[in-house]
Amino acid sequence: MKKLFAATFLTSVFFLLSSAPSFAQYGQYGQPAPVESILVDKQVSKPITKTKGGTTQYEYVDNLTPSDVRFQPGMDIYFKVRVKNTSSITLNNVMVTDKVPWYLEPIEGPGSYDATNRAISFNAGSFKPEEEKIFYFKMQWFAQDKLPADRGLMCASNYVRAYTNNTSDDDTAQACVEKQVLAVKVAPKAGPEMNILLLAGELGMLGVGLKLKKKAE
């Protein structure tokens, strides 16, 4: 009888355990909660070739130093921003803010531009795990007369940040602009021919002076 009771009790416990709902455990009592992570990469255009039609071809690099290509005032420059979800869960409402540095003005690209803060902002949407999106910005260097008068070479660092409520990442890309040297008019040097003309002019003036003196007498 005791054996039958024990067998019945064990069967009932097994049934209750097997039919109970399972719950995912997190924190110190189970698996850790998924962590959000994001990557943003900023690159700048480097002119490399020109086609027969005059179109410039570019490659994108992380930075351009003063020893690399130097842009001229008024030229266009392009930036590429790559945003990637590096976590194992979907990220929603990923925001991107691009800080436009001095010496540059935005021309084309996503988002809206706040001229007071010199910032471009937009919602990049949702990103599935390992999904990435690429955005392009067209900007233009200041004209010659808007650049500092006391500097010939200026470098600007373009900053970008991608973020959600729980994660963020940022990056920069640098490029440089060089002011054009304006032509300066130089007075012609006096050569032998110029000396002869000056001497002839002086003798002529002397002759006129003598005639006027004789008339006066």
Image (spheres, rainbow, N blue to C red):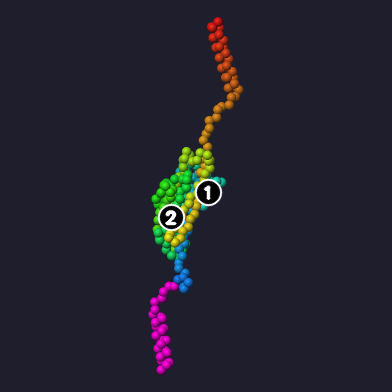
Screen quadrant of the N terminus = bottom left
Which x, y percent locates residue 113? Answer: 41, 49
- Residues in magenta? 1-25
Quick one: SS at disc 2?
A: strand
Badge 1: few (under 14), some or many (20 or more) residues near its Cα, within 10 Å? many
Q: Residue 4 sits in which quadrant?
A: bottom left
The alpha-carbon separation of the residues under discs 1 and 2 comes to 23 Å
Q: Residue at x 57, y 13 (%)?
A: 206
Q: Secondary structure at mark 1?
A: loop
Please give the residue where the numbered disc 1 appears in the rendered image: 64
Q: Is residue 192 above or below residue 124?
A: above
The amino acid marked with disc number 2 is Val
Regarding residue 191, the answer to whether it shows in the image is yes
Q: Position of residue 123 (x, y in %)?
A: 40, 56
Q: Is residue 208 left or right of residue 107?
A: right
Q: What residue is shown at x 40% (from left), y 61% (from top)? A: 92
